Image (tube, rainbow, N blue to C red):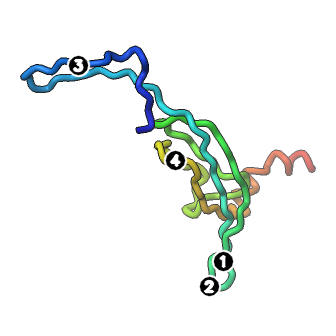
Amino acid sequence: MGYDTLKNNPKSYIFTKKYNQTINLKVKPHTKYVTLYFNQVDYDGKHKKLTLYATMYFLAMTGQTATILTPAGFTFKDGSTVRKLDIKENTGEVLYEVKKAPFKQQIKIYRGYYLLGL
């Protein structure tokens, strides 16, 4: 699942009574598009409000580990800006909740723009 066997693999195998027999199969991982949705989290009183902020698409292979970065000026709920995503056969759409980064962190992100404005 998630891989295709290559055509040059043997068509049949002969098993003996030995233990620990191995069969080598050559496979190729599936290539697929992954869609990431970044929803901005706001709290309206006691209720959580989600607003779609950004969408990102990329091409990945089954078994690959992708590094996901938040949009500029945002963090994940735990305050980090980076996540690892293991691409599996059923990985197609992934939803992330993000929040506005604290002002001090935003200054670091946009420091170059502020310097140009001076």
Residue visible at 21% across and 23% down? 22
User: Is residue 3 shown left or right of residue 55?
Assistant: left
- Which residue bears the numbered disc 3? 13
Judged by depth in the image, the label closer to the viewer, 3 or 4, is: 3
Residue visible at 72% across and 55% down? 54
Query: Who comes first in sequence, dot 2 or dot 3?
Result: 3
State the SS at label 4.
loop
Q: Amino acid at mark 1?
A: Tyr
Quick one: label 1, few (<14), some, or many (20+) residues within 10 Å? few
State the SS at label 1.
strand
Q: Amino acid at mark 4?
A: Thr
State the SS at label 3.
loop
- Which residue bears the numbered disc 4? 91
- Which residue bears the numbered disc 1? 43
Quick one: label 4, few (<14), some, or many (20+) residues within 10 Å? some
Q: Amino acid at mark 3?
A: Tyr
Query: Who comes first in sequence, dot 4 or dot 2?
Result: 2
